[in-house]
Image (cartoon, grey):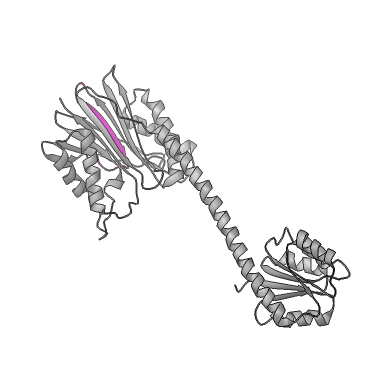
Amino acid sequence: MADETILVVDDEAANLQKLHRTFVNRYPVLAAMSGQEALELIRDNDNIAVIIADQRMPDMTGVELLRRTMDTLPDAVRIILTGYTDVDVLMEAINSCKVYRYMVKPWDPPDLLMTVERGLEAYRLGVENARFRKELIRRERLARELEIARDIQRYILPPQCPVLEGHEMAVEYHPAREVGGDLYDFDWDAGSGTLQVVIGDVSGKSIPAALYGAVFSGQLRTLFAHSMSPSANLLFLNANLIERYQVNNYVAVSWLTLNLAHGTGVIANGGMPFPLLSRNGEVTPLDISGFPLGLFEDAAYDQLPIRLIPGDVLVLMSDGTTDVANLQEEMYDTARFKESLRRHSTEDAPQLVKSLYRDISDFANNTEVKDDITIVAVKRRR
């Protein structure tokens, strides 16, 4: 590696020059004539891979110098040079300083170079192992964070659709990653016969979008208990998001309120694809638009009255349903989704949403899906 630097330390100028000449044509070399000077060089250079130190120096021994580098350069190759053999010093160096080799003077430059080369192989392996361990720890931590986010999302998304008098309801939800930014929720008040359905799409992906969606879902549950209209709910949520959450996320939302006894209701839309109404073999987009929530303080939200007759299917979906691309980079688009809905409109709601998703998957043909897919269908039986 080009940035692997060798530090040589010896208080005798002739030895220091010899050490310098041994490595200068192969590696960057730093030279110091004392232990203190060596420590100063270490403080200013974090790419030192090898330290070769004379044992007997005036200000500190080579072993002491190497010991003081343990915290700063834990993986460096450490080599002691000495003019005599001292077993006690040798054992101290090995035990306390992680010394790689103990070489007796006079040393031979080719032997020393070979020793350094072998030491660097071990050094590189150690650095790579350390990098691998850090990456393993990072991935384990990320996996745990993803598991927490999945738990949060499983908690906030309804586990099942309500059983409705004269109607069917079903949801098909597929996050593009481990956790998604799409959300949906509903409230069924059997006493008043009112069904509320909300589908949303938080900007962004994965954990940040899921957590932001969790905060937003909590506000939805609060609003379900009030009798405000869908457009009033979107106005309230938009103002609340702008006031309290100054982040770079926004939420696209469709809100449906439906009286099942009469099949009548209203729908408001803030940035989601137009809902689709299937009736007698024809599929019609419900032209209701609005800005996503959390972007503009003065955003206004209209609402569209709707009426379902027996056999009608109302579908709310996120833009991931039509943004899917195949291997030829063609988009699934709204036209294909509408045709799929037309073909499967006679199926019951649970089978219908599965068929719609299957057609999308078949079109993608194992191409990576880059956006969450959510489909909610409400079908009037009688």
* Residue 329 against residue 16 in the figure, above or below: above
- The image shows a total of numbered marks equal to 0
Q: Seen in the image, is 298 located left or right of residue 140?
A: left
Who's the residue at 36% across and 26% down the image?
224
In front here: 265 or 69?
69
Residue 86: quarter of image = bottom right
Q: Where does residue 259 sit, x and y in percent of width and height?
A: 24, 23
Q: Seen in the image, is 194 located left or right of residue 117?
A: left
* Residue 334 against residue 104 in the figure, above or below: above
In front here: 93 or 303?
93
Q: Specify the quadrant that holds the C terminus.
A: top left
Magenta residue span: 261-274
**Can residue 338 be seen here?**
yes
Q: Which residue is situated farthest in the right direction here?
A: 58
Who's the residue at 34% across and 42% down the image?
291
Q: Where does residue 202 sit, x and y in percent of width and height?
A: 39, 42
Q: Where does residue 169 sit, x and y in percent of width and height?
A: 25, 31
Q: Which residue is situated farthest in the top direction here?
A: 191
Who's the residue at 42% across and 35% down the image?
216
Residue 348: quarter of image = top left
Q: Is residue 95 magenta?
A: no
Q: Seen in the image, is 180 located left or right of residue 130?
A: left
